[in-house]
Amino acid sequence: MTAGGTVNVLIPMTGLPELSVPPLAITDGSADPTWVDVPCTGTFGYGRKRTLRLPFDAATADVVHRRLRLDQRVRTVWTPISVTLLIAALVTFFIPGDDDLLDVLRILFFVAGSGLSFWTAHLGKKVAVAQRPELVGRLAVFLPAVSALVAREWMTRNPTVLALPQRPRWRRYPSRVYQSAAAIAGIGIWWVALRDGTASLTALLAFLLLIGAAFILAFKALPVGFIRWDDAT
């Protein structure tokens, strides 16, 4: 059980078609809730999303509706604009010439694209709801911070539903695949760092990308449960 008398719920994919959701708000257990179709996070932003029809108290349901409207605007308007500006900044590196105007445009495009991304992320935090379903690969749907009373009712109605202390980590490939990929990225870092020749922006970007890839792949190669962020004191 998490803080505040809530429980994290895991719903296996095999149990979704016959999932029986009790008519109690998952936020506080109140009766006569407002039902909302909530898309599951954890998938490509423009792909077809699996949705769950979930009961919320009236105040939280209003926040959920505002978040869904924001997500729609981000996907259809703000993200395409931000990506276009960042691509435009990248394109200026390949335009021949050494013009101060290109440097100014590059900076403007990059600042505008990055600023727009940070702004939309800030707006998302204002309408964030803890009880948002998240896909765990192809295995299950993870629903955090459900009222403990309601979670017990969920598990009574659905024997396959589980209560977990934290979100399970799911990996698409075996650990050795990530280990091998991390080793290849490490070799790439070594090659870029030690090769002869003058440094270029392309080499710097490749070096930074390889470092990021090596760290991510090395983390995925660790055994599940090896790192527990909530164990920090």
Image (spheres, rainbow, N blue to C red):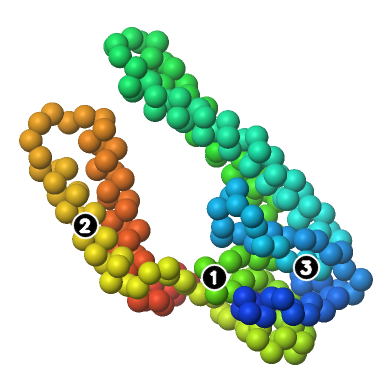
Q: Earlier in the sequence, mark 3 or mark 2?
A: 3
What x and y, as percent, mark residue 120?
Answer: 61, 40
Residue at x-position 21% and y-position 29%: 200
What secondary structure is marked by label 3? strand
Count up the numbered dots: 3
Disc number for residue 54: 3
Q: Amino acid at mark 3?
A: Leu
Picture quadrant of residue 103: top left
Residues under labels 3 and 2: Cα distance? 44 Å
Q: Residue furthest left?
A: 196
Q: Earlier in the sequence, mark 2 or mark 1?
A: 1
Camera-nearest residue between 141 and 152: 141
- Horizontally, residue 44 falls left or right of residue 51, namely left
Residues under labels 2 and 1: Cα distance? 27 Å
Q: Which residue is mark 2?
A: 184
What secondary structure is marked by label 2? helix
Nearest to viewer (mark 2 / mark 1): 1
Residues under labels 1 and 3: Cα distance? 20 Å
Disc number for residue 138: 1
Q: Amino acid at mark 1?
A: Arg
Residue 150 appears in view: no
What secondary structure is marked by label 1? loop
- Horizontally, residue 181 falls left or right of residue 76, namely left
Q: Residues within 10 Å of mark 2 (few under 14, many from 20)?
A: some
